[in-house]
Amino acid sequence: MIVDDEPLIRWSLAETLKGLGYVVAEAGDGAEALRSVSRDGEAFDVVLLDYRLPDSDNLSLLTNIRTLAPASVVIMMTAFGTAEVLSGALALGAYTVIRKPFEVQDVAALVTQAYAARH
């Protein structure tokens, strides 16, 4: 699942991941992400989660997703990453934190790596 409020980022990541054979769900904000995870939590092997969303700009969304879908690997994405955000996300169980802007192919490779680490 890709959680980001920027449609172009969601689209480019989704198209790239679909091209690699992944089934991709998208959410544009935290509430939509939580509804999806509550409904289909175990269906998401990897969650790409933006740190700053219109309805979430802290690590509580990460905590909620980790609680609802503990088997999902969460990769945080942020353009606003401080050392505190990085260390906090990792302490809460994020697989890694990547900085925006990023190369879509690099994220796709990271998703493949995270997916393999899960299974």
Image (spheres, helix red, strand yellow):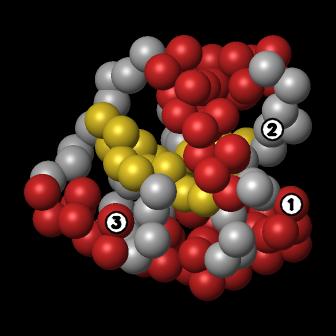
Q: Write down the residue under mark 2.
A: 24
Q: Are marks 3 and 1 in contact (CB under 8 Å)?
A: no
Q: Residue at x 68, y 64 (%)?
A: 72
Q: Which residue is mark 3?
A: 90
Q: Can residue 7 be seen at all in this image of the molecule?
A: no
Identify residue type, mark 1: Ala
Compared to residue 28, the image places residue 89 above or below, namely below
- CB atoms at circles 3 and 2 under 8 Å apart? no
Instruction: Please report whichever mark, 3 or 1, sits nearer to the chain's N-terminal start.
Output: 1
Which element carries disc 3, helix, strand or loop? helix
Depth check, mark 3 against mark 2: the one in front is: 3
Instruction: Identify the secondary structure beneath mark 1.
Output: helix
Residue 110 is left or right of residue 37, and the answer is left
* Amino acid marked by disc 3: Leu
Going from N to C along the chain, the mark reached first, 2 or 1, is: 2
Farthest bottom residue in view: 67
- Judged from the image, the secondary structure of the residue bearing numbered disc 2 is loop
Residue that mark 1 sits on: 43
What residue is at 63 percent from the left and 18 percent from the top? 12
